[in-house]
Amino acid sequence: MLKIQFVSDISCTWCAIGLHSLQTALNRVGDAVGAEIVFEPFELNPGMPPGGQNLTEHVNQKYGSTPSQFAQSRAMFRARGEEVGFTFNLDEESRIYNTFDAHRLLHWAGLAGRQHALKILLFRAHFTDGRDPGDHNLLVALAAEAGLDPVEARRILDTDLFAAEVRAREREWIDRGVRSVPTIVFNEREAIVGGQSVDAFETLIRKLAGQPATG
């Protein structure tokens, strides 16, 4: 059984690509390799205020990308997403938001065995539907869709439950040297960084499982 720790943020395009690439690779390998994916929290923008920021403005301020350069990046994200069955609907009006409460809910979902389902729904809500992953009403609805108790989800969001746990996990990964996401750690010993291809993930999975490489 492979233990896969997937360190990521909901507002990270490469994280959405990486997760869908990883899942496609695991589907290719099939039942020959069992795997458990644990989602670990990482905030790219922990100081992001409520309401977020225009995404084009954000990448210009943070990375120096011009609007035309970011338009090219959006086209690339759409193409990479299509390769692994994920839809990016990013445009000039797209926004980036605070994700801390979503990470709190994901921590709880992990305790309830519904973390993967919620993570997929969060990526879809944010990148496909353009929703704010910090919106409590949205988070409660997504929790219910993922098979979680919406009343308990609301109670968690209305308090500071799991805030300390999430911050502790974030500090631990930073202390371990994680500076960019996704960072995917296999069996606590081998890591791969970024939105890698399906082939790259499959090759590593087969190697760790002692299987011959394909093709």
Image: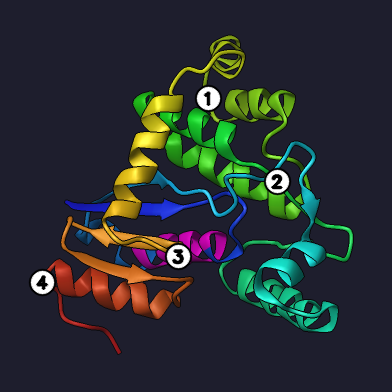
Give the quadrant of the C terminus: bottom left
Q: Give yes or no for residue 21 being in the magenta stretch.
A: yes
Circle 3 residues within 10 Å: few <14, some 14–19, many ≥20: some
- What amino acid is found at the position of numbered circle 1 in the picture? Gly
Res 194 → quadrant: bottom left
How many labels sit on residues? 4
Does residue 98 sit above or below 35 in this rendering? Answer: above
Residues in magenta?
15-26
Q: Give yes or no for residue 25 being in the magenta stretch.
A: yes
Determine the residue positioned at 67% across, 67% down: 62
| Residue on which the image places disc 1 | 147
Determine the residue positioned at 45% across, 65% down: 180
| Residue on which the image places disc 2 | 97
Q: Is residue 203 visible?
A: yes
Q: Earlier in the sequence, mark 4 or mark 2?
A: 2
Question: Mark 3 to mark 2: distance in Å?
Answer: 18 Å
Q: Earlier in the sequence, mark 3 or mark 2?
A: 2
Does residue 185 sit above or below 74 in this rendering? Answer: above
Tell me where residue 147 appears, x and y as whole percent: 53, 24
Question: Mark 1 to mark 4: distance in Å?
Answer: 35 Å
